[in-house]
Amino acid sequence: MATFVDKTILMDEQAIFRALVRIAHEIVEKNKGVANVVLVGIRSRGVPLAERIADAIENIEGTRPPVGVLDITLYRDDLSTLSYQPIVRPTTMPVDLDGKIVVLVDDVLYTGRTIRAALDAIIDMGRPTAIQLSVLIDRGHRELPIRADYVGKNVPTSSKESVNVKVMELDDADQVVIREEKE
């Protein structure tokens, strides 16, 4: 298994805050408000990011969009390589997704496979009017034709690097770190 070491702090707490507030403004603008919008955080770090975007939207619009939690474990195309007993956590949707604009929220967009799995899961739950994607970091290297509608920061990376997003709710810190594979 590869070992990674921290190389660069890409975003600190304030940079993450500013990116999420900007994304919240873009969601409101693109959708002409949030009356029909549902934010859906992809476990694990997409969930607190979705909650923070919802808080920022509430500060902007005075209305907080509902926030769902999506576990894509059983939709992954690499499920058989993960574990014989994968850990499946609950998926919760506060509203019916039929006719809604669903904004998927994740921390890092890389190959696109996580988002493909999330799209499959959302379609199994209903028929939204539209599905949009918000990510804190887009690092490139796509294997599928998927792009984000809202991006906190585009970061060109090499395949020997990884992007590690830390959020206070899960990691006791808010930062984005580029890590490099140790030889």
Image (cartoon, helix red, strand yellow):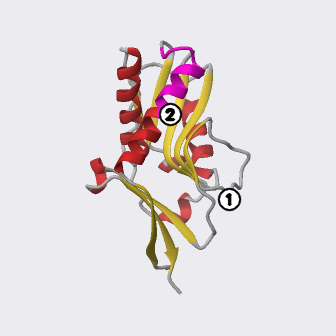
Q: Is residue 65 highlighted in magenta?
A: no
Q: Total label count?
A: 2
Nearer the observer, 113 or 151: 151
Spot the residue most to the bottom. Answer: 183
Residue 161: x %, y % from top left: 56, 70
Nearer the observer, 85 or 160: 160
Q: Give left or right: position of 4 versus 62.
A: right
Distance, label 2 to label 1, CA atoms, is 22 Å
Which mark identifies residue 141? 1
Q: Give left or right: position of 43 versus 150.
A: left
Residue picked out by circle 2: 23
Residue 149: x %, y % from top left: 62, 35
Residue 179: x %, y % from top left: 48, 70
Q: Nearer the viewer, mark 2 or mark 1?
A: 2
Q: Residue at x 47, y 19 (%)?
A: 96
Q: Residues within 10 Å of mark 2 (few under 14, many from 20)?
A: many
Q: Residues within 10 Å of mark 1 (few under 14, many from 20)?
A: some
Task: Please tell me whether residue 159 is drawn above or below residue 23 in the rendered image.
Answer: below
Which mark identifies residue 80? none
The secondary structure that dominates the magenta segment is helix
Spot the residue most to the right. Answer: 145
> Which range is magenta?
22-34
- Which amino acid type corresponds to the residue marked 2 in the rendered image? Ile
Q: Secondary structure at mark 1?
A: loop
